[in-house]
Amino acid sequence: MSNIRRIPVSGEGFKAYEVIVGQGLLNEAEKWVGPFLTNSRVVMVTDSNVGPLHADLILAQFEVAGRRTHKIVVPAGEESKSYDGLKFVLDALLDCGLDRKDVVIALGGGVIGDLTGFACAVYMRGIDFIQIPTTVLAQVDSSVGGKTAIDHEKGKNLIGAFWQPRLVLCDLDILKTLPAREIRCGYAEIIKYGLLGDKTFFEWLEANDDKVLALEPAAILYAVARSVEMKAEIVAADEREGGQRALLNLGHTFGHALEAEVGFGDMLLHGEAVAIGMAQAFRYSALNGECTEEESDRAVAAIAHAGLPTRMSDIRNAPFDADRLITHMGHDKKAEGGTLTFVLVNGIGRAFVAKKVSAELIAEFLILDGAVSSTTAPA
């Protein structure tokens, strides 16, 4: 099998593992996953969209190898990243009789990876799991680095744990089953890496975004592998987000607030929220003299060229109340001592963490950017 990239992820606080990126990997899933299985059974958690497409193909390989298989299917969608979804998965793991030597496979997008990872983190105080991410977004972001969580009504990913996988298997062929909207959402996280720390990669994406979005083999392999490499480097230096890893949240404080406001549903997908948030981070940075208008305009144009939203007005139920958005930001995990934390930029490829940002200044910016004040917001 050609054109496979093996990217190591290591750090002081966890066991090293690999992210395997390439075409056709699921056809040999047992070869990649089998060495990590101590017991004779295989348990897979997937969702109602991905499961019918891919689960049986993978599990059949383990059955041929003489292993017993179990499949746990949760409803597709962000709503499964909840207390109820967590209880469902934990109950199913208990029903399967798993012990601490078992390994669980998470087959799906970011929701399944986050939910399964968190369930494994707390099941019997921790059992191993393997990520098989099936979306672009999950392959380049959520499957790598060990962040696992469920959502809370007050905000996204507020209940969770750091729990690293033993292996991440990124089959690029599986992306061909995705709708164009999901591919664009994943691209938002890809361009994020260029915007936060690699201008050369950003410039390559400017010239090749159409090839990446069309899943041309060489282009998507390079885009996914480079994104994973950057994330692996950052996670190795800062697993628990005490410093450098926070840069990966470029666009997320703005974006998560919008997601919370519209209810974590199909109206605004995560990648779309991040796209708007990154555009806002650049516009806010330019407004405050942190970067030039030219750099900001270039970054926003590149996001828009990929077919992603860049303004709150692109969301169906806009405009939003600035004070409500600020309240959501106050529940963000990066908020400290009642102040707001943002990832801002000095230019393309030069992000930095800004702490103790004034909520009043952010509210003023949001109003300039299309939000309304609470005194004029519609009821």
Image: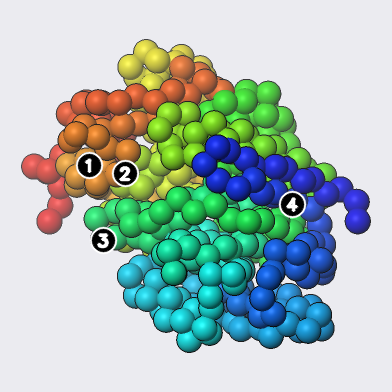
Q: Please rate how many residues cluster around mark 1, counting C-alpha atoms within 10 Å: few if below 14, some from 14 to 19, many from 20.
A: many
Tag 1's secondary structure? helix
The answer to which of marks 3 and 4 sits earlier in the sequence is 4
Amino acid carrying label 3: it is Glu
> Which residue: 42% across, 47% down?
273
The x and y percentages for residue 306 are: 60, 43
Nearer to the camera, 34 or 124: 124
User: Which of the two labelled residues, at mark 3 and mark 2, occupies the earlier sequence position?
Assistant: 3
The location of residue 312, given as percent across then percent down, is 36, 44
Q: Is residue 31 something that shows in the picture?
A: yes
Q: How far is disc 4 from disc 1 in space, using C-alphas?
A: 37 Å
Dividing the picture into quadrants, the one containing residue 276 is top left
Real-space Cα separation, disc 2 to disc 4, in angstroms: 30 Å
Dot label at residue 330: 1
Q: Which structural element holds mark 3?
A: loop
Tell me how far mark 1 sits from mark 2, CA to CA: 8 Å
Which label belongs to residue 333? 2
Q: Mark 4 points at which residue?
A: 20
